[in-house]
Image (cartoon, coloured by chain):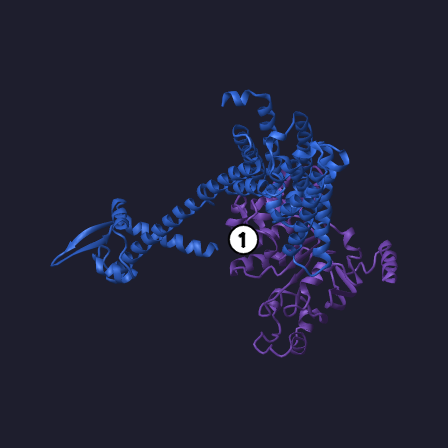
Chain colours: A purple, B blue
Amino acid sequence: MSDIQTSDTRKDEALHEPGQALHVEDLTVAYGAVTALWDIDLDIPPGVMCAIVGPNGSGKSTLLKTALGLVKPVAGHVRFLGRPVRQMRGQIGYVPQRQSVDWDFPITAREVVEMGLYRSLGWLRRPDAQTRARAMKALSELGMQDYASRQISQLSGGQQQRVFIARALVQDAPILILDEPMAGVDASTEAIIIALLKRLRDEGRTIIVVHHDLTTVQSYFDWLVMMNVRVIAQGPIREVYTPENLRATYGRQLAMIAPPAGGRDG
Amino acid sequence: MADLLSSAIVQTVLAGAALLGAISGMLGAFAVLRRQSLLGDALAHAALPGVCLGFLIAGARDLGTIMAGAFLTGALAALAMMLITRRTTLKTDAALGIVLSVFFAVGVVLLTYVQRQGRTASAGLETFLFGQAAAILRADLWIMGGVGLVALAVVLALWKEFKLVSFDAEFARANGFPVLALEAALTMLVALAIVVGLQLVGVVLMVALLIAPAAAARQWTRSLGGMVLLSALIGALSGAGGAFASAAQRGLATGPVVVLTATLIVLISLALAPERGLLWQALAARRARARISDRRVLATLQGLAEAHDNRHYPAESGMLKTALGAMPRAERLAGLEARGFIRPVTHPPETTPHWELTRAGHREADRLTRKTRDEEQGQ
């Protein structure tokens, strides 16, 4: 343990793997006696739109949370653009799972989006006109400008998800991490979200998404991480999305899932 | 009543009670939104041993020492609960139950020990069980006021951080906010509110003064600021109301009266508040049913007219019933007629009532069809 910590401190001083948007090395995470992640080695280059797929309980969300410093690993380390996450606060937009909050909280859609700017406001400073304007702009990028002063409890699931994404978008971060953003949203919301994420990717940002729908993964993403506690495969989606890898990730119950199709690219 | 209000003692008691209610109302709003209402209950019960220890140390009923003791054991209980939920497999409710009962048991043992000693000053100590507003002294007001100001200042200074942590602690952590410290600060403020509220409501019922004003306030407001402010006002009103009743009827335990006052406000709020109230929701559901029924009648008449290629097709009542699965209520049809969308016609030789769609009715049916489609897509 102490061995890991010393090597960790040393690596904090200098950039480590600065060429990767996300670099994960030897990462192991356990909840009690259950191993959630085992010896994960991962590199996601900048400027890609990357899906993380795997069956339920494969550790996808845990990987994101550990990368963001929300869960403490047993071993290993994580770097964003060469830096540990605590030096990258505010430069990583995070969209948690929608069910993780109480949507009956007395707050408007715009106020939720403003929360993305609280960090840059600093202590003691109140959200001002500029904060409001930036929040409005983020909402309109997701087609939600007309709902800005709605109570979040009055929004549909898809609209709530768009508010959550606007809250990350407003941070103008080079890296965006989304945990199951398409879960339980309608088709039109999904189209809006994907169009936005692709545009952000084309601006040079890195988009990392935990995704559950294998039928869309090939058309949405250009980079893929397949995992099931361990990393099964990672790389450009055309090279990685193969029947062998799918079988290795999901086991045998896979027959019904979309077969790899050539040529369709995000 | 005027006599009662002009008495300096009653004024002190009323002011103190209102102040305590306002403080717990303000902080209770955060506790309720963070789903920590029952943590307040455990902290309140855990304050009892602290009250007795404070008394033993001071050797008299000195509010400052007693409050310090109550705060200390309350904080200790909060810490114990955090350790239990983090380090063991016990769930939060079990941890709450254990901490609450163990601390309260210690408190009762200490209370009986103090009273056994037979010191005259200890006579008032059992009022901390159910509260007694009359025991509030003018000097106590300064302490309560000071605590209230500190709590208010902290809440104002950390407003957006408290808002963020209460709504989405995980996002706050991902953004590098010191979430543990902020949550601890909120919990400590709740402990503080409990400590000052003990005199008024007592340890057993204190949790109601935290939850009830917030629950009532949530019904009426749409913003966090509005909720916190209203919750403080309702708390003040309940506190003053309970204290007044207690002063008017000497010997009536203050705490229960305060709690009953607050509960009355909660019941009224649950029933009557716009949007969230039961009455409002029932009326809204009724209006929605009526609107949908009207839409279906118009759409059915239009469908029949189109099917028969006759814009003035007279539809027999029985056909409407068949198409809709049930006869629309007479007052709905009368309402549509009054708005000029349908009109009754006769269709000899049949003698049964018939209805046809007017020109305005056709326009309205078109508009509603578009609206229904937009609503479906808007989701």
Q: Is residue B344 left or right of residue A9?
A: left
Q: Residue at x 76, y 54 (%)?
A: A85
Kindly state the secondary structure of the residue where label 1 is placed: helix
**Residue placed under numbered mark 1 in the picture:** A159
The vertical placement of A161 against B47, above or below, is: below
The vertical placement of B21 against B34, above or below, is: above
**x then y, percent, for residue B226:** 56, 37
Q: Residue at x 56, y 41 (%)?
A: B214
**For this rendering, which residue is in front, A129 or A157?**
A157
Q: Is residue A204 left or right of residue B294?
A: right
Residue B26 seen from this side = yes
The vertical placement of A264 against B177, above or below, is: below
The picture quadrant where one finds residue B54 is: top right
**Quadrant assignment for the N terminus of chain A:** bottom right
**Quadrant assignment for the C terminus of chain A:** bottom right
Query: Which amino acid type is marked by label 1?
Result: Gln
**x then y, percent, for residue B138:** 65, 25
Q: Residue at x 28, y 62 (%)?
A: B323
Q: Is residue B287 left or right of residue B3?
A: left
